[in-house]
Image (cartoon, rainbow, N blue to C red):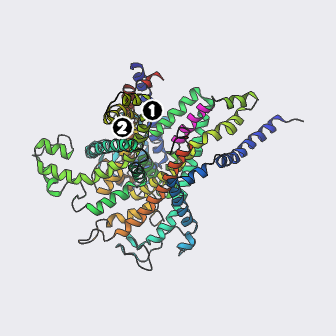
Amino acid sequence: MYNKAETETHGKLFSLVMWFVLIPVRIYRSKILRKLLKNPISVAGFALVIFFAVIAILAPVLAPPARPSRPYQIPRSGYSAIPKPPSPEHPFGTTEGQYDIYYGIIWGTRTAFYVGLVVVGAAAGIGIIIGSFSAYYGGLIDEIVMRITDIFMSFPFLVAAMVLTTILGKGLDKVIVALIVFGWMSYARVIRSEILSIRELAYVESARAIGANDARIVLRHVLPNAIYPILVQASMDIGSMVLTAAALSFLGVGAEPGYADWGQMISFARNWILGGQGNPLQYWYTVIYPGAAILFFCLGWNLLGDALRDVLDPRMRGRKA
Amino acid sequence: MLSYILRRLLLVPWVLLGLTFVIFGFLQLLGPNQRLSTYVRDPAQLKQGTEVLRQLAHKYGLDDPIWVQYGRWLNNVLHGNLGYSESANMPVDRAILRFLPASTELALYAILPMIMGSIWLGTISAVHHNDPIDHATRVMALTGWSFPTFVFGLLVLMLLYKWFPAGRLSIWADRIVNSPEFIRYTGMNTFDAILNGNWAVFLDAIRHMVLPVITLSYVSWALILRVMRSSMLETLRQDYITTARAKGLPEQVVIKKHARRNAMLPVVTLAGLTVAGLINGVVIVETIFNYHGLGLFAVRAAQQLDFAAILGFAMFNGLLLVVTNLVIDILYAYLDPRVKLQ
């Protein structure tokens, strides 16, 4: 017997799988990578991101954890508050509370990738679902959903994340939740406007004419073509999300004390910024190393995102670079 | 024009209502005792037995159905009653009003260099498209965009604090400002000093504001610069620019009068983002420079789990941003008549 419901589920599943296959294929075919590698700015961005990725992967080799069960806890040698300058034992010195700066930066790279990828992945996922839902149903539902995004956008991002983290309690997982709650709106807006413009195009009409159902049209024809602006947004966002998470830790509402996190390393440095007697730069290492780590991590993703936008934005295509 | 403004105005109450939903939702995430702490002034009361707590919860209606609670809470908020801030030891609405002038002063001084500087650089960058100066500006903007405010602020403080100390005023100036002879017209030190004719205090206030203002204006300039640059590039390609050149206008006039004025339109739409960026920046900058304003108040409240204060702060900023966006939208419709047709 012909089972209609079953074939339909299979069809949807197939579309979903195809989506994950189609997008990488499209990205490959569009020669984006090749174009990106021609541009020195994006090459620099790539290099930075890969550099940090290698550090994150090799963290256990570069800085073997003293207690393998809790590798993200920065080891401390003593409890003295005063930072100590770089020495063979502590290549970047120790910060307030004798936390090893080198260790904190190496394992903080993992924290940064974790925060950036999880927050952006979840925010983009939620945004795509809400945005496509809104664009697909249109009318009153669209209006309501867009007003809801307006409401979430009417809080300053850092302030909103700070308030929500405070309410949820201390810890990196709370920071991540807060950043996702206030991070999905731009994705919803972008995907919605992309879908609204794409669904008027001839190839969507042709797909409908040959009898493709709505789910198939959205998943296989509309979304894969609307995905580029999302990619640009995502790569720009990874840097800024990591920055905001670090800022929250800096303000004292982020990661727990001693957790390998760049923002926290800088908050440790705060009390020592004025230096000692007559030498304001005495404790430079407490702020320079973690600061440089955050700066270059964000710079890498932003350069990549910027180059990606130049390559992907159709309005920028065909112009001399 | 009028119908556009009306339509835009009609939306505001809904957004504000949504805003209260979000804040009230936050409040519901707290445990019952924490929620009680936003009502009770005396922390000792909270440490008593469960029976007392239950009575207190009943007194403040925390055991009522949720919509009754929401109604009561909203009524309080509409009357400006945002609860009691333990960290500042005063009602939240009074604390906000008290700390607001200091932050406003900071933001006012930061806006000018930020907007003027980025528009100027954006124009140069676009006019010299793909020249070394363009590349330099782009790299600078991207670096600035990635440079965390708190690292930048700490660095300038480390290098320059000898000449530009942290805080809001030196001790001697603080004493003058708080003395009865010194009349506080606005609560903003520099303006009050001018109005009182006290130039020593004025100079001291300025000296304390240099570093925070540099750090704060630097927060958003990269964004404005980039938008200005791409908008200027777009405008320079328009036919009317070719026409202006063809009729023999000097290049400076073409750029300054014909191109830049039109290219500045998209920058206006950024104003909302800029204000949001300033609020975020104020929080960090005041913390770094120990500048007693709204941001530092909020950070301290957050560190001490003073929930009434941070929820009030969130509410206030949400309101501020909604009003700003409204003003900007109306302004934009006035500047660019094409908007109204949509």
Q: Quadrant of residue B259?
A: top left
Magenta run includes residue B53: no
Toward which corner of the image does residue B148 lie, by quadrant? bottom left
**Number of other residues with Cα within 10 Å of mark 2, as a class: few under 14, some 14 to 19, many 20 or more:** some
Which residue is labeled 2 in the image? B320
Q: Is residue B184 left or right of residue B277?
A: left
The magenta segment is: A186-198
Q: In the image, residue B17 lies at what x, y percent?
A: 44, 33
Residue B160: horizontal and vertical position, in percent? 26, 61
In the picture as drawn, the residue positioned furthest to the bottom comes out as: A88
List x then y, in percent, for residue B170.
Answer: 18, 56
Mark 2 and mark 1 lie on one chain; the one further toward the N terminus is 1
User: Which residue in the structure is indicated by mark 1?
Assistant: B15
Residue displayed at 41% across by 22% down: B6
Q: Magenta segment, principal secondary structure?
A: helix
Amino acid found under the numbered disc labelled 2: Leu
- The answer to whether residue A111 is seen in the rendering is yes
